[in-house]
């Protein structure tokens, strides 16, 4: 008989085929040894078969590994695991081991199974029979103790020692049969610890509920004492199915987290500069952390049907009703389709259309229901659509009685009744009818009027019967106004920009303006017989005009300029001569009184003529 | 050069004048008296007399949604469903968002025996705003756009700040032009839809009295006109219901049309 060894015992790891468990479980070695003592070993002609558990005591939510080890031979096929109530044993892979002891080589093959308990208690794995090379080998029975999980003490949470824990939060403690509640599973993970995968629910026992969809919520932070935890909430819809004391839990789950490896070597150089180790990812170890939430109890009450309105058919929740009917003008015997939409929050899948006593004058076909269209991830809010075909049997039918739908509101603890308005119908004799046309009318928005709206008593305003605006020329003429305004302003801006970039043009405009005002001033001075000012103005006008033409500063223009810059450049000799005379007159006037009142006005046409010729001259 | 400050005021006044020109006017005292007299006839149950009085008002140029609405009611009460629908539709064209008109038109249409032409939701949606209202809205956006551009020319330093507004108003103008196009399409569909005003009429396979009967339409049925030849209209009451009907059997609901 040979004592059993754990697979890959040198590294202390168990190969499960799916993942490598940390086996920082060295602390569990004494238990493993104990398991080995209990393990069976059967040797037949050098062939051995041993069955072992990596540990014989686990907490609900955790898993154990069952290893079936064969030495001296291997079975032709994977051994079938035994069937144990509330214990799920699933194949996880196989591993091989080669040993060389005192010059003797031996090898063994292990078939590994993951053992997952469904509830706490003591379990016995019965002897397993396996045929190897035509011989039947049998293992001894194994014991597995599964402990009830409990939440960690507050001290370990508040001190931050606890890596992770789980809470279940229920919205209320008293519920009604048929009600849908949303339970919140809160996974608390110590801040700074990374989750390697989504939490895996390993146990969600409920008594008196049907479990609906599970949806993840938004991550948040929570502080306990000095410790900060990341909260991962998950929501699950639960429908109450029976009255009495109901329980949820203990809920168990496994969290796979990344922890810094204790063997990781830190780079002092990088640490000195506060740089994160880029190879940190290779120094992480994954750890499976089982978490559990304790059992929660609720009291489920029955809906007080003794106070229920007639027609109540067990709907619990909060709903609204939309109702449409079409066609409303039919021949006797023709179908009328009633479309009912019940929208709201509750067990939508369980909703049925109640029988309507007011519709007994119609022949009714079975109502059809479409699958509920839900609008939330938990599938408890949305709309369910029913279609009911009614056939009026006679022309005496004048209306469709209101549809009545009652439900129990568990929040307000009262029954509520939704009623649609009655719909007037016109049922003609069958022979006079044509094929009806469906024309649904949404009742809630536009309830059908029983008669036409009465006449208007006021004339209000008279409408102008004219062709549309777009066909009227005045419309287009008016539309042109803003365009013209904009174009005018655009042209103005362009002109200003042109002036700003052309100083010669700007000076030309300024000189033109100065000449216009100067000539007007000359007439005034001549009338006043103010010879000094008159000739000073003449001199200034000639200087400005000549300076602009020759692109010279105005003060630099004197009589000598005429010979230096004007002679031989296309200006008529008479003009040059007039210019000389004018400049000489101005000079004479500057030094002596030579003019009379009759001479000054006579000079103005001469000045105008010279300035005109200068303005038209292109140097 | 600065544009005179009053220029903008004049332009705004011109635009308002245009809007008013497209709008409505106050009724005269004679028109009000005739209208009330017609209403009294209606209240007394003299629906035929009321019809004559309302039509007289319309022929006198008193075109009002209220007159068409009351005329529709009078026709409805006298059992002439098709003419009632035609009157309601004329009223609806003038006041497309009047809830009373919409309710009575819907109520009257519910009484009609099939087949009948249904214009579709898009046409119904864009029939709730008149063509002139879309035009004014687009025109307002157009004016705003060019006035913003003009302000940008006067105050170049504001140009950058006004750029989002210019894009917004320009986008609104384009959107309104699209809406105008759809409304124009809706108006065309409505204008091509006639109403049967006889108790029962045969739609034939050809424009001849001797042609085979394709199907029968009833009082109030609406038909889309696809073509016409002499006194006959080629109409559709649905996708596969096509045929020829005599022009005298149907009425086209046009506001302002003379009534006999």
Image: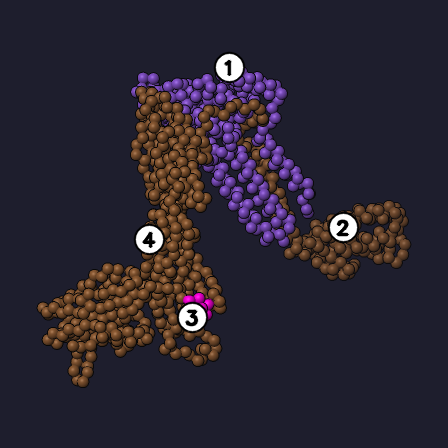
Looking at the image, which residue is at 36% across and 51% down? A245
Secondary structure at badge 2 equals helix
Determine the CA span between mark 3 and mark 4: 33 Å
The tag earlier along the polypeptide, 3 or 4, is: 3
- Quadrant containing the N terminus of chain A in the rendered view: bottom left
Label disc, if present, on residue A235 of the rendered structure: none
Q: Residue furthest bottom?
A: A102
Chain A's colour? brown
Looking at the image, which residue is at 56% across and 27% down? A463
Looking at the image, which residue is at 42% across and 74% down? A277
Label disc, if present, on residue A161 of the rendered structure: 3
Determine the CA span between mark 3 and mark 1: 94 Å
Determine the CA span between mark 2 and mark 1: 88 Å
Label disc, if present, on residue A207 of the rendered structure: 4
Horizontal and vertical percent position of residue A434: 33, 24
- Quadrant containing the C terminus of chain A in the rendered view: bottom right
Label disc, if present, on residue B46 of the rendered structure: 1
Residue A159 in magenta? yes
The tag earlier along the polypeptide, 4 or 2, is: 4
B8 left or right of A292?
Answer: right
Looking at the image, which residue is at 81% across and 53% down? A537
Residue nearest the viewer, comparing A51 with A523: A51
Mark 4 in CB contact with mark 2 (< 8 angstroms): no
Residue A298 in magenta? no
């Amino acid at each position: 008989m040979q004592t059993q060894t754990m697979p890959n015992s040198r590294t202390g790891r168990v190969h499960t085929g799916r993942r490598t468990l940390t086996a920082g479980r060295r602390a569990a070695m004494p238990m493993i040894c104990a398991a080995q003592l209990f393990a069976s070993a059967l040797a037949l002609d050098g062939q051995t078969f041993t069955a072992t558990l990596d540990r014989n005591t686990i907490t609900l939510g955790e898993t154990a590994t069952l290893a079936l080890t064969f030495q001296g031979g291997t079975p032709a096929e994977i051994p079938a695991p035994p069937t144990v109530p509330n214990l799920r044993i699933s194949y996880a892979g196989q591993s091989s081991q080669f040993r060389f002891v005192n010059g003797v080589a031996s090898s063994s093959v292990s078939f590994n199974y993951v053992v997952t308990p469904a509830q706490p208690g003591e379990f016995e794995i019965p002897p397993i029979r396996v045929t190897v090379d035509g011989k039947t080998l049998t293992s001894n029975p194994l014991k597995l103790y599964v402990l009830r999980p409990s939440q960690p003490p507050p001290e370990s949470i508040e001190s931050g020692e606890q890596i992770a824990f789980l809470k279940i939060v229920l919205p209320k403690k008293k519920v009604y049969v048929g009600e849908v509640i949303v339970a919140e599973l809160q996974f608390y993970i110590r801040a700074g610890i990374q989750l390697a995968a989504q939490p895996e629910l390993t146990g969600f026992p409920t008594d008196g509920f049907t479990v609906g969809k599970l949806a993840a919520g938004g991550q948040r932070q929570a502080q306990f004492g000095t410790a900060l935890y990341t909260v991962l909430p998950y929501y699950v819809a639960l429908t109450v199915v029976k009255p009495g004391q109901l329980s949820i839990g203990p809920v168990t789950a496994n969290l796979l987290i990344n922890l810094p490896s204790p063997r990781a070597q830190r780079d002092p150089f990088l640490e000195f500069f506060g740089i994160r180790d880029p190879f940190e990812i290779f120094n992480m170890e994954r750890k499976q952390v089982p978490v559990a939430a304790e059992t929660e109890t609720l009291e489920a009450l029955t809906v007080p049907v003794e106070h229920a309105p007639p027609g109540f058919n067990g709907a619990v929740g909060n709903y609204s009703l939309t109702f449409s009917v079409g066609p409303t003008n039919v021949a006797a015997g023709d179908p009328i389709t009633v479309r009912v939409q019940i929208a709201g929050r509750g067990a939508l899948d369980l909703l049925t259309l109640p029988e309507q006593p007011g519709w007994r004058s119609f022949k009714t076909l079975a109502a059809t229901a479409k699958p509920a269209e839900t609008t939330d991830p938990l599938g408890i809010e949305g709309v369910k659509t029913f279609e009911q075909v009614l056939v009026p049997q006679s022309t005496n039918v004048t209306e469709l009685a209101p549809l009545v739908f009652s439900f129990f509101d568990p929040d307000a603890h009262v029954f509520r009744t939704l009623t649609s308005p009655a719909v007037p119908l016109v049922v003609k004799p069958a022979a006079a009818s044509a094929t009806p046309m469906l024309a649904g009318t949404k009742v809630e928005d536009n309830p059908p009027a029983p008669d036409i709206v009465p006449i208007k008593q006021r004339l209000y305003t008279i409408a102008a019967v004219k062709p549309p605006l777009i066909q009227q020329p005045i419309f287009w003429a008016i539309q042109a106004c803003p365009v013209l305004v904009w174009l005018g302003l655009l042209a103005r801006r362009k002109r200003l920009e042109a002036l700003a970039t052309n100083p010669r043009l700007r000076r030309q405009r300024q000189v033109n303006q100065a000449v216009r005002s100067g000539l007007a001033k000359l007439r005034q001075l001549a009338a006043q017989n103010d010879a000094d000012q008159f000739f000073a103005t003449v001199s200034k006008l000639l200087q400005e005009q000549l300076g602009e033409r020759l692109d010279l500063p105005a003060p630099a223009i004197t009589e000598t300029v005429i010979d230096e810059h004007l002679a031989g450049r296309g200006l008529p000799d008479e003009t040059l001569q007039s210019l000389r005379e004018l400049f000489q007159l101005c000079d004479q006037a500057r030094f002596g009184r030579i003019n009379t009142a009759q001479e000054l006005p006579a000079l103005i046409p001469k000045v105008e003529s010279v300035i005109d010729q200068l303005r038209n001259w292109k140097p | 050069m600065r544009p005179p400050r009053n220029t903008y005021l004049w332009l705004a006044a011109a635009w308002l004048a245009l809007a008013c020109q497209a709008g409505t006017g106050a009724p005269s005292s004679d028109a009000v008296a005739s209208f009330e007299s017609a209403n009294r006839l209606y209240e007394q149950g003299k629906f035929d007399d009321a019809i004559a009085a309302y039509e007289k008002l319309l022929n006198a140029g008193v075109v009002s949604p209220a007159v068409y609405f009351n005329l529709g009611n009078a026709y409805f009460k006298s059992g002439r469903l098709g003419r009632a629908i035609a009157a309601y539709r004329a009223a609806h064209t003038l006041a497309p968002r009047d809830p009373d008109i919409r309710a009575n038109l819907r109520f009257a249409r519910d009484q009609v025996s099939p087949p009948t032409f249904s214009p579709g939701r898009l046409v119904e949606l864009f029939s709730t705003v008149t063509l002139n209202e879309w035009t004014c809205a687009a025109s307002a956006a157009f004016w705003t756009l060019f006035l913003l551009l003009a302000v940008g020319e006067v105050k170049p330093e504001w140009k950058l700040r006004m750029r989002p507004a210019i894009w917004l108003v320009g986008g609104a103008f384009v959107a309104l032009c699209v809406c105008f196009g759809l409304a124009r399409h809706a108006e065309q569909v409505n204008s091509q839809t006639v109403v049967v005003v006889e108790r029962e009429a045969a739609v034939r396979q050809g424009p001849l009295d001797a042609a085979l009967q394709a199907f029968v339409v009833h009082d109030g049925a609406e038909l889309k006109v696809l073509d016409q030849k002499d006194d006959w209209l080629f109409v559709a009451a649905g996708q596969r219901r096509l045929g020829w009907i005599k022009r005298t059997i149907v009425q086209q609901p046009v506001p302002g049309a003379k009534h006999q």
